[in-house]
Amino acid sequence: EVQLVESGGGLVQAGGSLRLSCAASGFDFENYAIGWFRQAPGKEREGISSISDTDGTTYYADSVKGRFTISRDNAKKTVYLQMNSLEPEDTAVYYCAAARLIVVMLAANEYDYWGQGIQVTVSS
């Protein structure tokens, strides 16, 4: 059974940090690109970061560039999203997703498997 399980979310004050984890099982993780997406109430799902399977190239949306860092540990089948300098606008449900074949790294419709999501709330 394919599973992607997010952890590390919660409530943090503006300016604080959180590290999200995405633990994968049930598929050949090392051959999949992994992305992080988020969806705030009343807004569309937004691709914020991804990391390739081939060479670990990373991608970031402008909204998080310079504040968030994505990394992966293939031995642990886990991807991390370090989030620094958090802002109230970062409040959303965060999802990780896996893609076997991908062209546009932050396009949600290119991802095959999705986690259930985890809430991140940033208070002002």
Image (cartoon, helix red, strand yellow):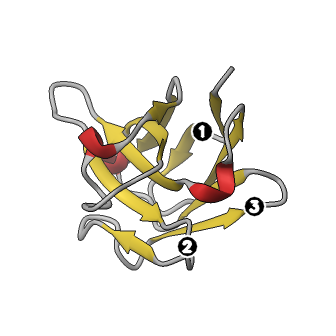
Quadrant location of the N terminus?
Answer: top right
Residue 58 picture quarter: bottom left
If you read the primary sequence from the N terminus, does the residue marked by circle 1 or circle 2 appear first? 1
Gap in angstroms between the C-alphas marked 1 and 2: 28 Å
The front one of 105 and 71 is 105
If you read the primary sequence from the N terminus, does the residue marked by circle 1 or circle 3 appear first? 1
Q: Residues within 10 Å of mark 2 (few under 14, many from 20)?
A: few
Q: Secondary structure at mark 1?
A: loop
Residue at 17%, 34% in the rendered image: 44
If you read the primary sequence from the N terminus, does the residue marked by circle 2 or circle 3 appear first? 2
Gap in angstroms between the C-alphas marked 2 and 3: 11 Å
Q: Position of residue 9 (x, y in %)?
A: 60, 38
Residue at 65%, 31% in the rendered image: 5
Horizontal relation, residue 87 to residue 16: left or right? left
Residue at 67%, 38% in the rendered image: 27
Q: Secondary structure at mark 2?
A: loop
According to the image, label 1 marks what residue? Answer: 9
Residue type at tag 2: Thr
Q: Position of residue 95 (x, y in %)?
A: 46, 37
Instruction: Kindly report which numbered mark, 1 or 2, lies closer to the viewer in this rendering.
Output: 2
For the view shown, which residue lies furthest in the right direction?
75
